[in-house]
Image: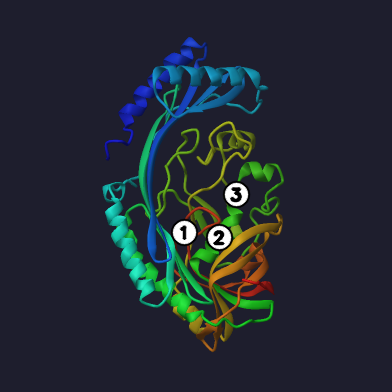
Amino acid sequence: MPADALTESQCREIFDRVVRAAQSAGARDVEAMIGSRAEALTRFANNTIHQNVAEASRWLSVRIQMDGRTARASANRFDDETVRRTVEQAVALAKAVKPDPDLQPMTGPEPYTPVSRFHDSTALTTPDIRGAAVKEAIDCVESAGQTAAGIYSTEQETESLFNSNGVARFHSETLAVFSITAMAGDSSGWTKASATDRAGISPASLARSAAQKARLSKTPRELPPGRYTVILEPAAVLDLVGQIFGDFSATAIADQRSFLTERIGTQLFGRNITIHDDVFHPFQAGSPYDGEGVPRKRLTLVADGVPTEIAYSRASARKAGVASTGHGLPLPNEIGEMPLNIVIAGGGASLDEMIASTDRGILVTRLWYIREVDPYEKIMTGMTRDGTFLIENGSVVCGLRNFRFNQSVIELLTNVEALSPSVRTSGEETFDMMVPAMKAHGFNFTEVTRF
């Protein structure tokens, strides 16, 4: 591990000082989240690298619990004086807030399964390594007579959670992200990928894909709005379907702000839709414990189109008389819990096979500017971009002007006809997930956009 990353022993030493400061301030129950992050970014535009930046940060977040109250204070230094002031601020805030009748004692230790997501090859990536990969990607786009823009970032993060009741958690991971847009005169193409190990990303391959989309979508035709069969590539699926998972929350359902209210156990989607939350999936990211240190459990959120399981924090689980699933967010918060490691089960159809089976339809690379219109029916509006194509007689025949859509995600997941294998996917609107491409009928495009 690089020298500037916090180690577990360093985090433990900092927490010991937090405990001593809390005792001096008259507080017995204390929790601390301690971590570090180092990020580096190479940005390019107009076929030229124009920015290389790096940032390192560390943090300390202290939560005090006393007399049925809890509050948190944070800092970005670890010296004794800063630790003391941070603890005293948390104590003062805890004394000032109202008691929380749902607040439970701090969780105690229980076994959890660590996950390995730290790769030295990613953490030790230099600007020269990123620059060489970016140059190769730019060359691919430039050789097609197009202009490239995008980013290549690498980061490493360590995080820990300790409390005075014996919980001790530590997790470290790395992440590499590459995104590229290829721009031609009246068209564009886009691809993006992320991985904990940068060896899992091929910037040149991604650049060739973006350039091909820009080439195929030149001189776009205008198709009238209406309901069409669509093939959504994984990034489009991610950014649209990914909007619904905050509703798989016991707190959201209890507050009646979830579309799953009174729908758990009903046939809500097509029978070919199965969705898990699985922190242990090999292509996922994140820590195997939640914001209170509770181990995460694998959930089957949807089985054969039927919503079956939801996420619980300790507080919502206690109200429901069940066990926490380890999906609670750091306290205090008003959201409660959320599944963060989504895996939408795929099928056996390739993207080419989906296209070949389509008499007339629209292929969508990605979506953006997505907003919720109807929270109970999960109707979303947004636009296509960077590669929208007309399919006729089983072939992509031309690019299309972009559309605005108004589409229920529930209806979409009812109308799915085919699924590709799931892949780790990055988008712009939500966090990375494992998702397939989807072919579905009746997708509602409402107007052609001006750009």
* Horizontal relation, residue 105 to residue 280: left or right: right
Residue underneath mark 1: 426
Residue located 39% across and 66% down the image: 47
| Residue found at x 56% / y 45% | 338
Q: Residue at x 55, y 60 (%)?
A: 239
How far separated are the C-alphas under marks 3 and 1?
A: 18 Å
- Residue 345 shown left or right of residue 118 in the figure: right
Q: Residue furthest bottom?
A: 393
* Residue type of the residue flagged with mark 3: Gly
Find disc 2 in the rendering and name its residue: 239
Say which label, 3 or 1, has the lower sequence index. 3
Q: Position of residue 373 (x, y in %)?
A: 71, 58
Picture quarter containing residue 55? top left
Q: Residue under label 3, please give it.
A: 246
Q: In the image, what residue type sits under mark 2?
A: Asp
Circle 1: residue type? Ser
Categorize mark 3 by other alpha carbons within 10 Å: few (<14), some (14-19), many (20+): some
Mark 2 or mark 3: which comes first in sequence? 2
Question: Disc 2 on helix, strand or loop?
Answer: helix
Q: Is residue 114 visible?
A: no
Pick whichever of labels 1 and 2 is earlier in the sequence. Answer: 2
Mark 1 near mark 2, Cβ–Cβ under 8 Å? no
